[in-house]
Amino acid sequence: MMGTCSLCHRPVRAGGLCKTHYERRRSGDPQWGRVIRGRRRSTDDLLKYIESRCTTFNGCLLWQGAVNSDGYGTIAVQGRTLSVHRLAYELRHGPAEALCVLHSCDTPHCILDDHLHLGTQAKNASERQERQRDWQSKITHCPKGHPYDATNTRIDKTGRRVCKRCDYDRPRRGSRSST
């Protein structure tokens, strides 16, 4: 008779674990530890390693390792490049699933737990617009030179800014010009 997994009671594959838990252990799931530079580290050791590569500045815990072109800290774990802020969040709180890990401090390489929270991609985009950190907020006039201000701007159903003056001047479908 085959044994059962020590975690979920499914049939054992190897090492007292079912196929799912065995593969998680082999692939470096946070529950089983991760491999950095050929050394298996526990979740606590990995978090300590990450925090040891940080400095404190203006109330943030800033990653001093590699950063990508957008300024987000990165780290290579088991041959994959991961975002340090997301990894730090997941090590402290568990998997973030399909959600984004957002910064309340607007500092991309900050990993301080108090500055990280979960949110959707839509919430991330709206926070970026509110704080005027997106590229669109730097554009103050429409292509025809009209200002994007409260009286001349509306938001369309896709979330884009539309110049009301240009929208008014645009010929409508089905309308005929007088000749």
Image (tube, rainbow, N blue to C red):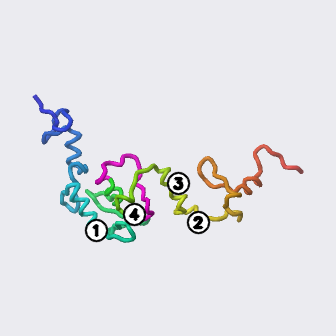
Label 2 is placed on what type of residue? Lys
Q: Earlier in the sequence, mark 1 or mark 3?
A: 1
Name the residue rendered at 58%, 66% in the picture: 138
Q: Earlier in the sequence, mark 4 or mark 2?
A: 4
Question: Which numbered dot is residue 53?
Answer: 1
Q: How far from the left and from the top, in percent, is residue 155?
A: 63, 52
Image quadrant where residue 7 sits: top left
Along the viewing direction, whichever of 9 and 102 lies nearer the viewer: 102
158 sits to left or right of 5: right
Question: Which numbered dot is residue 126?
Answer: 3
Image quadrant where residue 10 sits: top left
Secondary structure category for the residue under label 2? helix
Image quadrant where residue 116 sits: bottom left
Q: How far from the left and from the top, in percent, is residue 42?
A: 20, 55
The residue at which mark 2 appears reads as: 138
Q: Earlier in the sequence, mark 1 or mark 2?
A: 1
Crowd band around label 4 with a 10 angstrom C-alpha radius: few (<14), some (14–19), many (20+): some
Specify whether residue 91 is painted magenta: yes
Q: How far from the left and from the top, in percent, is residue 56?
A: 34, 70
As measured in the structure, the alpha-carbon distance from the residue carrying label 1 to the one carrying label 2 is 34 Å
Label 3 is placed on what type of residue? Ser
Q: How far from the left and from the top, in percent, is residue 163?
A: 69, 57
The residue at which mark 4 appears reads as: 72
**Range of magenta residues:** 90-107
